[in-house]
Image (cartoon, rainbow, N blue to C red):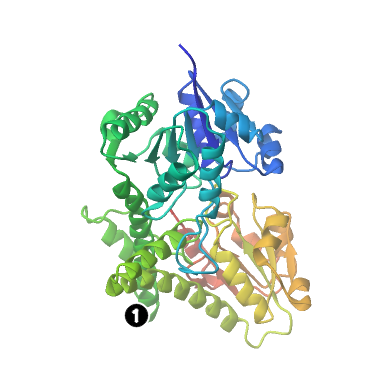
Amino acid sequence: MKKKEICCIGAGYVGGPSMAVIAFKCPNIKVTIVDSNNDRIDAWNGPLNNLPIYEPGLKEIIEEVRGKNLFFSNQIENTIKNSEIIFIAVNTPTKVSGRGKGMAADLTNVKQCTESIAKLSESDKIIVEKSTAPVGTGEQIKSVLKQANKENKFQVISNPEFLAEGTAINDLINPDRVLIGGEKTSEGEKAVNIIADIYKNWVPENRIIKTNIWSSELSKLASNAFLAQRISSVNSLSALCEKTGGKIDEVSTAIGMDTRIGSKFLKSSVGFGGSCFKKDILNLVYLCKYFDLEEVAQYWENVIKINDFQKRRFSKKIIDSFKGIEKNPKISILGWAFKKDTNDSRESASIDIVKSLLENGIGVNIFDPMVSKKNILYDLGKLTKTERMNVKISTSIDDSLKYSYGICILTEWDEFKKIDFKKVSSKLIKPILFIDGRNIIDLDRISDLFKNIMSLDT
């Protein structure tokens, strides 16, 4: 029997881990990940300690399957021709111009992939939409394929990812559910079952949900919107707690013990980040506006507004604490990734907070154990000459404390929770504050740190 071949276009945060797990769990399937970014492909084929994506457990899986049935290649044309199933896992950023600017997803990359598939295909294929995309993307993919290739038959499937960065490998190996959407035709249902059979190699059948393609696409946006909504809800309550004397930890614990609500995503923080939540909510807002559901659009848009409010509120507390201090004070920023156990800093709350500090004349010493200096500087973008002088990328926690007045923990890395802050306080120039991502804590109350350490489970 011929070995089934899968191609995945896109070697990023979705394509890399997702295909690695499929290869790991399905040794009878050849999986090839292709990308036009040669540096990224080289990194995937390079030393295991320098993979382009950091995820606990990913290195071990790559070591097990790379070169056996998992391959990384820039030979896009041949891979597409030889594959029976093609996953599209490319970036779908928010549009920066044209209709839907600032809200709708930019499907340029998806369309370019689809056109390449149509042009290069010499046999029937199943196209799997893995990228986070708005409702109707599958229809657009089908339209492009039909117009560009009338010789072959294509079935388009929606199979959104529900992995969380930092726990991606466990989420892929032990998923809450696998969602597969396709056309309600005999050919469509056959294609859905082919994809389902791949996952059945390790996922219980009762966790595999089969829907139509629209339901699948909308479920992805809705899931992220619901999760982000919970974070913004508890963050709004954290502001009220500070005004009234309530303790957000106690409030969230009480709320979370209600079995109808549950405890996940009820940790207050400086705001959610990452590549999905904001983008998907904006997608949902645009979709609601498109269908003249203005009240629904405003409801979801407010989730974003609360997230922005939390970051502004946090930055203001720091800035106000430095009033009266001599010129050019500095503060240690511990954490740049948007959450622990990932090197992804896209939409990290740290970016907005640091920019605000710099604009107000407060310098920063930044340290993150996984995010590179190059990425941090890229995230900060164009800075004035003075702002550039006030940024230092530190190589260790101790290095970040030099000439610092205080500390911000903005990513909940485990190593930050092990810091002896009594010793740390002696290294600060003038230990006026400690910031844990939710509250400014006087160093006189340092024991509170261990009760209030920031924890994001997004």
Total marks drawn? 1
Residue 241 or 83: which is nearer the viewer? 83
Residue 379 pos. (x, y %): 65, 62
Check disc 1 and report its element: helix, strand or loop: helix
Residue shown at the point (48%, 18%) measured from the top left: 28
Q: What is the quadrant of residue 66 in the picture?
A: top right
Q: Nearer the viewer, residue 70 or 342?
A: 70
Determine whether, in the image, residue 101 is placed left or right of residue 285: right
Amino acid type, label 1: Thr
- Residue 176, compared with residue 308, is above or below; it is above
- Taking 434 as reference, is 428 left or right? right
Which quarter of the rendering shows the C terminus? bottom left
Quadrant containing the N terminus in the rendered view: top left
The relative height of residue 83 versus residue 283 in the rendered view (above or below) is above
The residue labelled by disc 1 is 244
Q: Residue furthest front?
A: 150
User: Local crowd at mark 1 within 10 Å, few (<14), some, or many (≥20)?
Assistant: few
Residue name at image x 59 percent, y 20 percent: 68
Q: Is residue 398 visible?
A: yes
- The answer to whether one can see residue 9 in this image is no
Residue visible at 35% across and 50% down?
Answer: 217
- Which is nearer the eye, 414 or 153? 153
Residue 321 position in % (x across, y down): 58, 81
